[in-house]
């Protein structure tokens, strides 16, 4: 590239070396030179199916989807996605680990509702009688009541004689739900809508990165009480682990919010569940699922799970110490279950990380004293801001030696920080669908992921809050990434999965085994593609 | 972590990291040298911006669903114009305008007024205009020879209208049926055909369908606006006045040098006599004459520093075959030899349809390399100033145009929207001084980004890529001058301040095609205006 090329051959030669130089930082780059013949063949098959579907499935007219295209808005395009062969293929892919997911949003809302309906303690109430006029704006409030307070009689929440704010047993409220609202099914729809984001909300009513959080947080406030009822929580954990395994995820590090967990109620409806109880329960769920899978001869499908201890950024800095001490105590008692520490919540309105510097420095000092290590795994840069407090969280996360960054959406604006991530091996937990539904990007084609990949920043794809967005498992997120780029191929996805293992908080030994297991499953996956989809 | 001695030490290291992260920024390099006056003005502007973000942009507007700074331009424009920031920026000396397509640089109502005064201008349509088809049928304009005037032609809206018959424009206006709004209905029909409306860009559902496919449909509308306006600007009596208006309105907005791209696809334009006999050479003579006239006028008013000059970027369209391109390349060389001071560079390729649909640069590699050879033979230097990377694609043909533009030694890149994906190319642009002509409002309306906060400009700035802000096609988008584009950039970032805008304006001069002495002159003129601008800001506070 010293000067302008003179002839066409020379030109084309220089062109190839320029493109190579431009892509050499990519983490799939060396792999492209060394990958197996099998992988190359499978990659080519997938690329040609992708191209074929871009010209067929994605060009068809859909009455309710005016402008379909690969990588389009997820909530609108989901129906088309599920019809594609690419989706079918990716659902079989071994995904590695799930590194960014919030425990309150991990199980399909329909299933959560079914769990709740079976509980005699769960009651529901509304602030005014539900009517056609207010059903869209009123959300259910749930609470497990102590046995003495169960209310199995009295009017339903749509009855004109319902006394506002009276607790009604959930199954009874469902049965009595007025036929003009769709009866029992109408009840289900109302509850599920309150726990998920609909396309008209994400792309209409709340269509900005700031406003969408109103609805997003409201979904959590509805489901939170159900999830944090011990008898449900136990089953919920089990279902989360099993459904992840079904999607090809063999290890997960969900974030459990111990600030929210303070509202966890026991079977008796009382606030008597300790954080220690929760961690014990988590350990138990892992054991049970492992045993179950081993019995089926599927032991390799699940290698374990860890908790990322989190609190919400609403906690005042002076009140954080209590949680940090709690986290240290839990880590000491359950070293194999606590993966790290994080603070969560809507970055744009809550405390920036810099507000917590003193407690963080204290946290570090205490760890040294106790001879333990609890790495930071911070959320940071989940914003469109440029140089505002939220964007600047990325500086703090890195200065505080975070091992990974949750989202890091704004990282691409920071050349120095990208370099540090690449050189120090700080992985970004990228959540494509979450970012799009929460309006940081309009579609996958506008997502900054290609910048990260071309700069060699380690990335793991994650689902964030799948029960709210509907992107259960990891297949949907892998799909969106694959179809929105012509550089990325199957080998790129393979490297993303491998990095999710590499940058997990598993021990060295565990990682070694995980990589072996994954490589074997990857090979089987590639073979399946070649045998099933070769024309 | 153990490396922190305490909170103070942490904050010190934090500051150092932030400085290092921003050290490539081009205004950062001069930040230490900023005058106290500039520091003060910058602070004032930041304060006003913060205040307006919390006031003007928080107010409820019945017809604007979710207002925020940097929002969709076509919807937010009314709010923008109410702000004090806009008022201030309209007085800012902007430097040079490096990316604008001549046919889309003058307010459409002015162009339309010019057209109405020309007896030679006629209009025709392929079918009688009705309430049913008025939204889709576009007017075609042309200057005719006197013998063909259709002064008493039949109304376009009459059932007696013979498709494709030319009718004098004033006559067509007068006879426009009252059921379609009469003469005002005609005005609206013509003006709509030359601009993009919010409901067209954003769809009836506000911001839902910002899709690659939608992009194409937006481009279709975009292209048709050019075809309509082109029928008028190809007529030399209009062309001449149009140029004058373009220069004057740019000067009015604080622009002191312009390098419009002129589309030379048609080998001949239409003269005052209605004959298609005006050569590219004739057009350049007119161009030169208008520059001299405007300069003389300004000199008379003692304002010669407001307008240093203008150049042309010779352009044609990618629909032509690689073989046909050779004629244009030779034409360009001939013009450059005769008017060395007017031809800044070449080529634009993508007028009809966008980069995503037309042939990639690589298809033209042979004639383009040949072009370099021919220049060496003729002893002229016509740098490429190429459009590239105006796409959301990752590794598709349009994205890959970036590689070719840079390999071909492009002097600047038009848009380069996808550059941020390419670490090596970013480095090359920074090190070789290849400036990006960034058109924020154009990118947003053509749906490459949903709003300014999603625009990749901060990535470019933090990587030290030279950038000049440009308006692209202001008559179509409504972002006349450069104030709107500067506005959108300023309000969508907290890193960017007045000094950043100053650096962008300075770079527009540095990376223009002016001669060394001209540049010096321009720089001096600009610095003087910049100081008065800063003084004005400090005075209003
Ligand atoms: Zn998260
Ligand atoms: Zn352009």
Image (cartoon, coloured by chain):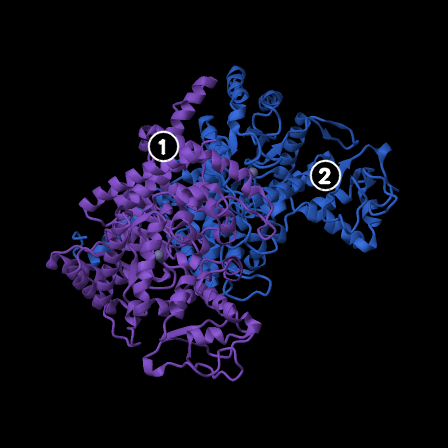
Chain colours: A purple, B blue
Q: Residue at x 51, y 67 (%)?
A: A185
Q: Label 2: few (<14), some or many (≥20) within 10 Å?
A: many
- Is residue A365 toward the left or the right of residue B244 in the image? left
**Residue sitting at the far top:** B377
Chain letter, disc 2 residue: B
Q: Nearer the viewer, residue B131 or A468?
A: A468
- Is residue B372 toward the left or the right of residue B3 in the image? right
Q: CA distance from mark 2 to mark 1?
A: 58 Å
Q: Residue at x 47, y 55 (%)?
A: B491
Q: Position of residue B134 (x, y in %)?
A: 75, 48
Q: Position of residue A508 (x, y in %)?
A: 18, 45
Label 2: which secondary element: helix
In which of the image's four quarters is ligand 2 placed?
top right
Whether ligand 2 has any atom under 8 Å from the Cβ at mark 2 is answered as: no
Residue named by callout 2: B232
Residue named by callout 1: A39
Quadrant of residue B295 within the rendered picture: top right
Q: Position of residue B462 (x, y in %)?
A: 38, 44
Q: Label 1: few (<14), some or many (≥20) within 10 Å?
A: many
Label 2 with label 1: CB-CB less than 8 Å: no
Q: Residue at x 82, y 32 (%)?
A: B145
Q: Nearer the viewer, residue B139 or A507?
A: A507
Q: On the same chain: label 2 and label 1?
A: no
Chain letter, disc 1 residue: A
């Amino acid at each position: 590239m010293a000067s302008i090329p003179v002839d066409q051959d020379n030109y084309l030669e220089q062109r190839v070396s320029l493109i190579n130089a431009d892509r050499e930082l990519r983490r799939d780059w060396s792999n492209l030179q060394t990958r197996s013949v099998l992988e190359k063949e499978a990659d080519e098959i997938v690329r040609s199916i992708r191209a074929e579907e871009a010209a067929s499935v994605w060009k068809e007219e859909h009455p309710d989807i005016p402008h379909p295209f690969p990588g389009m808005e997820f909530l609108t395009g989901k129906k088309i996605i599920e019809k594609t062969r690419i989706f079918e293929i990716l659902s079989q892919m071994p995904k590695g680990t799930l590194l960014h997911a919030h425990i309150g949003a991990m199980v399909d809302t329909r299933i959560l509702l079914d769990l709740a309906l079976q509980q005699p303690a769960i009651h529901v109430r509304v602030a005014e009688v539900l009517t056609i006029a207010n059903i869209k704006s009123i959300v259910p409030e749930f609470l497990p009541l102590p046995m003495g307070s169960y209310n199995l009689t009295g009017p339903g929440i749509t009855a004109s004689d319902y006394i506002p704010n009276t607790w009604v047993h959930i199954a009874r409220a469902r049965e009595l739900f007025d036929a003009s609202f769709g009866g029992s099914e109408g009840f289900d729809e109302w509850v599920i809508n309150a726990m998920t984001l609909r396309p008209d909300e994400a792309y209409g009513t709340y269509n900005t990165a700031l406003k969408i959080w109103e609805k997003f947080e409201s979904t959590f406030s509805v489901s939170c009480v159900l999830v944090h009822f011990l008898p449900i929580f136990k089953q919920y954990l089990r279902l989360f682990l099993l459904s992840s395994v079904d999607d090809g995820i063999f290890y997960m590090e969900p974030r459990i919010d111990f600030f929210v967990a303070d509202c966890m109620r026991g079977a008796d409806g009382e606030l008597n569940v300790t954080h220690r109880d929760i961690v014990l329960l988590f350990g138990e769920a892992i054991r049970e699922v492992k045993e179950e899978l081993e019995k089926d001869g599927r032991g390799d499908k699940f290698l374990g799970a860890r908790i990322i201890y989190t609190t919400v950024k609403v906690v005042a800095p002076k009140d954080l110490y209590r949680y940090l001490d709690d986290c240290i105590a839990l880590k000491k008692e359950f070293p194999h279950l606590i993966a790290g520490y994080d603070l969560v919540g809507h970055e744009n309105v809550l405390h920036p990380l810099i507000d917590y510097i003193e407690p963080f420095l204290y946290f570090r000092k205490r760890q040294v004293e106790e001879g333990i290590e609890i790495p930071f795994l911070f959320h940071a840069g989940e914003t469109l801001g440029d140089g505002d407090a939220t964007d600047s969280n990325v500086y703090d996360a890195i200065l505080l030696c975070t091992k990974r960054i949750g989202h890091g959406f704004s990282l691409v604006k920071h050349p120095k920080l990208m370099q540090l991530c690449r050189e120090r091996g700080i992985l970004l937990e990228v959540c494509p669908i979450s970012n799009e539904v929460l309006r940081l990007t309009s579609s996958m084609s506008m997502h900054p992921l290609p910048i990260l990949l071309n700069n060699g920043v380690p990335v793991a794809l994650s689902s964030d809050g799948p029960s709210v967005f509907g992107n259960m498992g990891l297949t949907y997120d892998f799909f969106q990434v694959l179809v929105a780029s012509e550089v990325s191929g199957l080998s790129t996805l393979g490297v993303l999965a491998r990095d999710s293992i590499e940058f997990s908080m598993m021990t060295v030994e565990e990682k070694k085994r995980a990589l072996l297991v994954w490589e074997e499953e990857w090979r089987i996956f590639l073979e399946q593609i070649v045998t099933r989809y070769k024309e | 972590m153990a490396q922190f001695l305490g909170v103070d030490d942490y904050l010190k290291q934090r500051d150092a990291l932030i400085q290092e992260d921003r050290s490539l920024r081009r205004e950062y390099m001069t930040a230490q040298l900023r005058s106290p006056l500039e520091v003060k003005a910058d602070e004032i502007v930041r304060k006003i911006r913060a205040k307006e973000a919390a006031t003007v942009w928080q107010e409820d507007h019945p017809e604007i669903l979710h207002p925020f700074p940097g929002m969709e331009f076509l919807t937010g424009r009314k709010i923008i114009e109410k702000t004090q920031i806009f008022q201030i920026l309209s007085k800012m000396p902007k430097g040079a305008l490096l990316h604008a397509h001549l046919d889309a640089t003058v307010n459409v109502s002015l162009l339309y007024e010019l057209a109405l005064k020309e007896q030679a201008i006629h209009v025709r349509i392929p079918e009688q205009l009705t309430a049913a088809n008025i939204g889709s049928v576009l007017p075609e304009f042309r200057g005719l020879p006197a013998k063909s005037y259709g002064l008493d032609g039949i109304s376009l809206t009459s059932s007696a209208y013979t498709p494709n018959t030319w009718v004098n424009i004033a006559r067509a206006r007068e006879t426009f049926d009252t059921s379609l709004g009469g003469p005002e209905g005609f005005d609206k029909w013509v003006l709509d055909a030359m601009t993009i409306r919010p409901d067209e860009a954003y769809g009836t559902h506000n911001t839902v369908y910002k899709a690659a496919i939608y992009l194409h449909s937006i481009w279709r509308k975009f292209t048709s606006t050019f075809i309509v306006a082109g029928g008028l600007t190809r007529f030399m009596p209009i062309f001449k006045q149009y140029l004058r208006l373009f220069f004057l309105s740019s000067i009015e907005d604080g622009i002191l040098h312009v390098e419009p791209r002129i589309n030379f696809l048609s080998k001949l334009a239409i003269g005052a006599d209605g004959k298609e006999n005006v050569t590219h050479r004739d057009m350049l003579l007119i161009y030169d004459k208008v520059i001299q006239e405007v300069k003389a006028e300004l000199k008379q008013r003692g304002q010669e520093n407001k307008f240093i000059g203008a150049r042309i970027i010779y352009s044609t369209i990618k629909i032509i075959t690689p073989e046909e391109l050779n004629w244009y390349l030779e034409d360009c060389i001939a013009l450059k030899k005769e008017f060395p001071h007017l031809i800044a560079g070449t080529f634009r390729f993508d007028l009809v349809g966008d980069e995503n649909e037309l042939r990639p640069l690589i298809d033209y590699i042979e004639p383009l390399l040949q072009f370099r050879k021919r220049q060496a033979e003729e002893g002229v230097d016509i740098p490429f100033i190429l459009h590239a990377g105006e796409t959301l694609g990752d590794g598709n043909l349009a994205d890959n145009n970036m590689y070719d533009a840079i390999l071909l030694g492009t002097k600047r890149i038009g848009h380069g929207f996808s550059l941020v994906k390419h670490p090596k190319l970013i480095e090359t642009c920074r090190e070789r001084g290849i400036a990006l002509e960034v058109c924020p409002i154009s990118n947003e309306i053509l749906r490459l980004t949903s709003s300014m906060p999603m625009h990749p400009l901060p990535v470019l700035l933090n990587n030290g890529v030279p950038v000049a802000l440009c308006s692209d096609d202001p008559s179509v988008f409504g972002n006349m001058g450069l104030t709107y584009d500067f506005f959108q950039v300023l309000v969508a970032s907290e890193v960017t301040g007045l000094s950043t805008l100053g650096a962008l304006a300075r770079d527009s001069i540095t990376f223009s095609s002016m001669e060394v002495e001209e540049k010096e002159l321009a720089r001096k003129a600009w610095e003087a205006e910049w100081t008065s601008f800063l003084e004005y800001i400090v005075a209003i506070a």
